Image: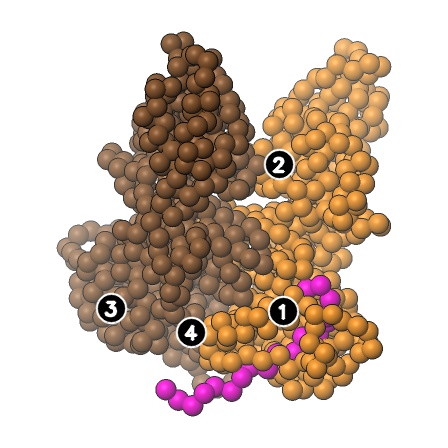
Chain colours: A brown, B orange
């Protein structure tokens, strides 16, 4: 054999929960990881903002507050700081200096993905971000490589553990939304201010990344339609169960004509769909492809150690490329589909309402649907006290027609109240 | 930029269901695939045994019955013939000549994997076999690359669609085994001679490949303990449901002390486990890793088009390595754990039996368990006609002790019949 390979020098930026696990694993598993890389690996340093702070468990001699100096002497830069800045600037600095980059920074990839991809492609270095999409779940490699000879038509993802936990508790234990949220907060699944989770913002960032991956498409965060779960009631959950469905907060990216739509909202999913079996704080992404059909990827979407596993897998890949050659797929090779507003999406709706309890009401309601060209698939009457309950499911129709229908229902004398409107997905 | 890259020359061996889909996709998607590879791709020829046979849909001018000549002028050889020979000889010929290989041949990889891996590593070429494990489901890349910085502790797989269909029909529609099997045959899910599926032989081949992948371990087909589903009755299915479980045929590979055990058998799985939600002829593989925790990969495990999707993904990867450099992970880099017999596995058992209807029976039965050191977790009495029914679940214990316990029960005066013995998995 030839002379020993020079070692691959790895910089870790950010000593937080994920970073300290990554450092631990890089240290403990160094020999095995080096064997998989094909060359010795070595941590050149760990960037921290404040050197004075005590950091138990991290090797003191590797800590530095000079990020640029650290980056300049590294082959692989692992960004685990989170937030947009200085993460973005440091990653661009690393790429410009010829280093490959691994990041777990969801907010950054969602907001500035295209800029980073283009910089990496121009510099001919790798930019890997498996942990930014769905924590430990391997998704980027399957989508970019395993499905490289296929075409994805749709992605449906449960990508926020907090909201899945809340909805699952509402479904399986009959809890009210507020009680389930409080329980999630007590267990540490939800923040004191749960807005980013329950209003779907976290899922929207992941939806933008998933859509970009699936459709080789620039999808900006502001292109993602976003609706959270805070309006979901026990009544919605019970009505869903009665028709063999569960409510899940989904991140959806799908082809719509020549464009794509990207949206996050609660949806009714059949109990027979694999996504219905995703309980607790777990995540799962269901991918539909032309040849492969339906595929699902399930696992933990958050947490220091699971996320570290995904980061390590990326480090081995990009370090291997440094050691023996090769490069991951191009990222900035974009298709030119338009990202369409949600009104262009085709969905089914389930509309639950209180109606006047008199003859002719069903025909008046049906007339509203017909006037907007929306077909009714199923009608269910539910006895009520002052008003009768009516639950209607539609055939698939453009979202804009469904919205106009709901407006028409709200304006109709026959309808006392439109109690909830939920999209039906996964069919 | 530099001068145009030379094209990557691809040979397809075997024009069957998968092969013709692969040829169709390579032709239809040539431009897009070439862009992903980083160089033009080109089919050099399609090997068929009998040139005289009519093959609608395949380009006549590409057909050849000279396999060696075709291999000699190709960079990538795609083996889709199935069977051990001549597939093995032709793959070794391709590797020796410096070509990279993609195969979907489960039987061959299970029987001769180590020989092929070593040949590929020695020749420094790629050997990819995503489609040989679980059809369209991306599994090899996630296990070899995404989890490259993690340690897999256990794999539980539903890797045979026929048996999952039969068990699912028994569970969800209350069909008897014979009726469900007949229905599977009518729908084309099961062969006229269903032995390879229902006795677990197909799953055992996949278990050997999965175990080799997960544990970097040589696992031969004859090391896999194998038990099929033909003895499963409606009574078993009903008893499972009453305790919140379903019956699945699982391929299991797990660490056991310093070694690993690899086995295929029907198992009780909690309805809350993600594997319980895998219906019909779908496949899924649940992977447990030290850092990542539980991950599941779900999709179609068979079929021409889904399998072709996995083959295409492999072709793009190995062709990209030819065009721009790089190489997949080494395969022959084996750990040195022993493959242990199933008696070394630790499992829980659920034992269903008919017992004499008299005082002292439970204590006699409990004494048999105690004498082999097996703890009882749960006892359920079921009224019967001539005999009482008794269902016992044990705590985890070595399989050898559980087996001795069952022998003891069969010999006991208190026990009229041991009706079924099922392992409980996924906990």
- Work out whether disc 1 and disc 4 sit on a shared chain: no
- Label 2 crowding class (10 Å Cα cut-off): few <14, some 14-19, many 20+? many
Question: Which quadrant: the N terminus of chain B?
Answer: bottom left
Q: CA distance from mark 1 to mark 3?
A: 41 Å
Quadrant for residue B406, please give it. Answer: top right
- Work out whether disc 1 and disc 3 sit on a shared chain: no
Question: Which quadrant: the C terminus of chain B?
Answer: top right
Residue A278 in view here: no
Task: Label 2: state its secondary structure.
Answer: strand
Q: CA distance from mark 1 to mark 4?
A: 28 Å
Parent chain of label 1? B
- Label 1 crowding class (10 Å Cα cut-off): few <14, some 14-19, many 20+? some
Q: Position of residue A259 (x, y in %)?
A: 40, 57
Q: CA distance from mark 4 to mark 3?
A: 18 Å
Residue corresponding to mark 4: A327
Q: Position of residue B219 (x, y in %)?
A: 68, 60
Q: In the drawing, what numbered circle is on residue A92?
A: 3
- Label 3 crowding class (10 Å Cα cut-off): few <14, some 14-19, many 20+? some
Whether residues under marks 1 and 4 lie with C-beta atoms below 8 angstroms apart, the answer is no
Query: Is A262 positioned to the left or the right of B221 in the image?
Result: left
Magenta span covers which residues?
Answer: B1-18
Parent chain of label 3? A
* Residue at x 23% of width, y 53% of height: A83
Give the mark toward the camera: 1 or 2: 1
Q: Position of residue B145 (x, y in %)?
A: 49, 63
* Residue at x 70% of width, y 31% of height: B173
Q: In the drawing, what numbered circle is on residue B269?
A: 2
Give the mark toward the camera: 4 or 2: 4
- Work out whether disc 1 and disc 2 sit on a shared chain: yes
Give the mark toward the camera: 1 or 4: 1
Q: CA distance from mark 1 to mark 2?
A: 40 Å
Name the outermost residue toward the bottom.
B3
């Amino acid at each position: 054999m030839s002379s020993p390979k020079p070692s691959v020098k790895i910089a870790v930026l950010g000593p937080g929960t994920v970073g300290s696990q990554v450092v631990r694993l890089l240290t403990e598993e160094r020999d095995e990881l080096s064997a998989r890389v094909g060359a010795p690996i070595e941590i050149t340093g760990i960037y921290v903002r404040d050197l004075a702070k005590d950091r138990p468990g991290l090797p003191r001699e590797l800590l530095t507050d000079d990020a640029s100096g650290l980056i300049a002497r590294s082959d692989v830069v692992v960004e685990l700081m989170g937030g947009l800045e200085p993460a973005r600037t440091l990653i661009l600095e690393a790429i410009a200096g010829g280093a490959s980059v691994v990041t777990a920074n969801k907010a950054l990839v969602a907001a500035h993905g295209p800029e980073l991809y283009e910089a990496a492609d121009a510099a001919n270095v790798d930019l890997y971000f498996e942990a930014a999409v769905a924590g430990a779940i391997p998704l980027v490699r399957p989508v970019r490589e395993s499905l490289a000879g296929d075409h994805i038509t749709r992605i449906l993802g449960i990508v926020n553990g907090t909201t899945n936990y809340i909805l699952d508790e509402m479904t399986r234990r009959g809890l009210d939304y507020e009680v389930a949220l409080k329980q999630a907060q007590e267990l540490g699944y939800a923040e004191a201010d749960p807005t980013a989770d329950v209003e779907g913002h976290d899922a929207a960032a992941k939806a933008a990344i998933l859509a970009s991956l699936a459709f080789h498409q620039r999808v900006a965060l502001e292109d993602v339609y976003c609706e959270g779960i805070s309006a979901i009631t026990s009544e919605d959950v019970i009505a869903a169960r009665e028709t063999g469905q569960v409510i899940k907060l989904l991140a959806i990216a799908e082809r719509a004509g020549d464009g794509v739509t990207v949206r996050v909202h609660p949806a009714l999913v059949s109990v027979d769909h694999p996504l219905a079996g995703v309980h607790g704080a777990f995540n799962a992404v269901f991918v539909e492809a032309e040849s492969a059909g339906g595929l699902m990827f399930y696992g933990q979407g958050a947490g220091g150690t699971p996320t570290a596993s995904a980061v390590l897998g990326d480090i081995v890949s990009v370090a291997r490329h440094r050691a023996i050659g090769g490069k991951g797929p191009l990222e900035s090779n974009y298709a030119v589909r338009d990202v369409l507003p949600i009104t262009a999406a085709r969905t089914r709706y389930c509309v639950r309402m209180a109606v006047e309890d008199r003859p002719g009401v069903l025909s008046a309601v049906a007339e509203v649907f017909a006037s907007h060209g929306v077909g009714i698939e199923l009608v269910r009457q539910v006895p009520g006290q002052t008003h009768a309950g009516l639950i209607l499911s539609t055939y698939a129709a453009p979202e804009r027609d469904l919205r106009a229908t709901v407006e028409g229902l709200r304006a109709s004398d026959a309808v006392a109240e439109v109690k909830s409107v939920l999209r039906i997905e996964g069919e």
